[in-house]
Image (tube, rainbow, N blue to C red):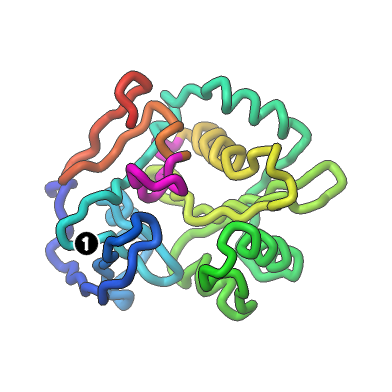
């Protein structure tokens, strides 16, 4: 089987165009996999081909005339933390992380709501509905965990929604305490996912899409070495040639 091509039984449905959330003046379009055929084994394969999960749906960008969204994955056994990463670890050395089953709690939702209000004001996401919480973050067929990150007093600092795959982890979404900016909790969550994947001897952490020119996505380029899916293959990017 050619690992760089879609399985022959996959049919993709193209969604309508909408204004791009990351690059002003551009239109965003996605291709979606039929939810009726999705399961964990197929999802593992689609992640390898550059797809992404949102709730029960799996998609990839399909914008006309634009290939700015580039899938990124980290080879966890070869990842080397930068000075910035080491400082982040020292700042958060008091925090404890653990995977738990995904569920709705008032504590999770309160942190989620504070995060969205601080990071996405006026963007349509800053007034979340409790009924949409698990619908957005989990699915009926994926092997999903919440990576809880807590302070010594038990206070919830961050939740990294993580899909467990045969070949690694997929970082689906992270929300964290917006009133602790000096900690770099988003960065720390990725470092913890890398650490845990390495402990489980899994090769990859999938970070979703990096978009050159988007300030919101710039952080993904800092985790090196990394691989980016360009065309139909993964290309290694080292510290000397990162964009």
- Across and down, in percent, residue 81 comes to 52, 24
Residue furthest toward the right?
153
Q: Residue at x 73, y 31 (%)?
A: 93
Q: Residue at x 21, y 74 (%)?
A: 13
Badge 1, how many Cα within 10 Å: few under 14, some, many 20+?
some
- Vertical placement of 83 versus 131: above or below? above
- Across and down, in percent, residue 236 comes to 27, 29
Q: Which residue is mark 1?
A: 63
Q: Is residue 11 left or right of residue 69?
A: left
Q: Quadrant of residue 24?
A: bottom left
How many badges with numbers are in the image?
1
- Across and down, in percent, residue 216 comes to 46, 48
- Vertical placement of 160 versus 25: above or below? above
Under circle 1, the secondary element is loop
- Nearer to us in this view, 91 or 20: 20
Placement of the C terminus among the 4 image quadrants: top left
- Nearer to us in this view, 202 or 92: 92
- Across and down, in percent, residue 111 comes to 70, 61
Q: Residue at x 24, y 38 (%)?
A: 234
- Vertical placement of 65 versus 199: above or below? below
Q: Quadrant of residue 86?
A: top right
- Vertical placement of 107 versus 75: above or below? below
Q: Is residue 115 left or right of residue 50?
A: right
Q: Which residues are magenta?
A: 202-218
Q: Is residue 212 magenta?
A: yes
- Nearer to us in this view, 130 or 64: 64
Q: Is residue 205 left or right of residue 213?
A: right
């Amino acid at each position: 089987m050619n690992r760089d091509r879609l399985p022959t039984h996959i049919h993709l449905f193209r969604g309508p165009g909408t204004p791009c959330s990351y690059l002003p003046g551009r239109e965003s379009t996605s291709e979606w996999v039929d939810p009726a055929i999705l399961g964990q084994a197929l999802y593992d394969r689609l992640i390898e081909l550059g797809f992404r999960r949102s709730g029960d749906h799996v998609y990839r960008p399909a914008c006309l005339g634009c290939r700015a969204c580039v899938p990124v994955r980290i080879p966890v056994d070869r990842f080397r933390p930068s000075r910035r990463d080491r400082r982040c670890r020292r700042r958060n050395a008091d925090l404890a992380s653990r995977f738990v089953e995904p569920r709705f709690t008032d504590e999770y939702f309160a942190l989620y709501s504070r995060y969205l209000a601080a990071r996405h004001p006026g963007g349509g996401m800053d007034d979340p509905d409790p009924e949409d919480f698990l619908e957005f973050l989990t699915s009926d067929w994926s092997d999903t965990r919440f990576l809880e990150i807590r302070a010594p007093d038990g206070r919830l600092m961050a939740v990294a929604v993580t899909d467990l795959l045969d070949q690694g982890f997929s970082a689906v979404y992270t929300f964290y305490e917006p009133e602790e900016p000096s900690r770099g909790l988003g960065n720390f969550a990725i470092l913890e996912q890398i650490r845990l994947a390495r402990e489980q001897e899994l090769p990859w952490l999938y970070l979703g899409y990096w978009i050159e020119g988007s300030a919101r996505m710039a952080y993904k380029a800092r985790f090196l070495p990394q691989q980016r899916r360009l065309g139909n293959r993964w290309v290694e990017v080292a510290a000397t040639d990162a964009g």
